[in-house]
Amino acid sequence: MIIKSATFVSSNNRVDKLPAPALPEYAFIGRSNVGKSSLINALTGNRHLAKTSQTPGKTQLINHFLINEEWYIVDLPGYGFAKVSKSSRAAWEKFIRRYLLLRENLQCVFVLIDSRHEPQKIDLDFCYWLGEQRVPFMLVFTKADKQSQAQSDANIGKFRKALLQWFEETPPHFLTSAESRLGCAELLTAIDEINAK
Ligand code: GDP
């Protein structure tokens, strides 16, 4: 897929204020600092589209970006930041769960996972919840340029093995780098294929 245009549409903190669900959309989510903004910028070829944040967990907003006038990238607030209170974490969960369960035009959730780390409970728990709720998702391992392919592969293997405790098969996965754009074309092709269905 060629990205001809990528424009910011809206930031929302309420599910009932989101853009009309008239176009297919793809949500990106992961722990704060996983590289979500950088990956969205790399995918769209626009270095300023999503803000790369220095203050993890500060923005609790759902951002919509319109791509090629045909579909949306949805930037969801990151989870797992240490410095927020229990009450704001509970509010985050309610808001995101509502979005993920109710959004009728949501085609797929891309769960971002830092390829440098061994499987983290918070990521596994989130994938378990998505699977249990039958929300379609794929795995996107980030920051591949930061270590060897063998190290990334080992961590991906462990993550998939952990998911196989619960599921009969694991969802498709991508190994990506916002620096080198590794995996970006493959991820866009996957979106293209779903849009074409
Ligand atoms: P977010 O909080 O998930 O949106 O994460 P950001 O996109 O703000 O990235 C967090 C930090 O990781 C920033 O310092 C980025 O420059 C860095 N980063 C993100 N993706 C990559 C990547 O693919 N390669 C490298 N080397 N650094 C990355």
Image: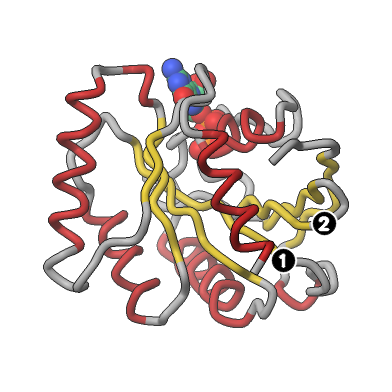
Give the side of residue 54 with respect to residue 22, left or right.
left
Tell me what residue is drawn at x 20 percent, y 62 percent. Answer: 163
Label 2: state its secondary structure: loop
Give the vertical position of 182 relative to 105 (above or below): above
Label 1: state its secondary structure: loop
User: Is residue 55 something one can see in this rendering?
Assistant: no
Cβ–Cβ under 8 Å for marks 1 and 2: yes
Q: Residues within 10 Å of mark 1 (few under 14, many from 20)?
A: some
Tell me what residue is drawn at x 33 percent, y 80 percent. Answer: 132
Rendered image: mark on residue 24: 1
Looking at the picture, how far across and down is residue 21, in whole percent? 79, 74
The kind of residue on which mark 1 rests is Pro
Give the side of residue 23 with respect to residue 145, left or right.
right
Looking at the picture, how far across and down is residue 28, in whole percent? 55, 51
* Residue at the spot of label 2: 70
Tell me what residue is drawn at x 83 percent, y 46 percent. Answer: 68
- Sequence-wise first label, 1 or 2: 1
Cα distance in 3D space between marks 1 and 2: 8 Å
Looking at the picture, how far across and down is residue 58, in whole percent? 59, 44
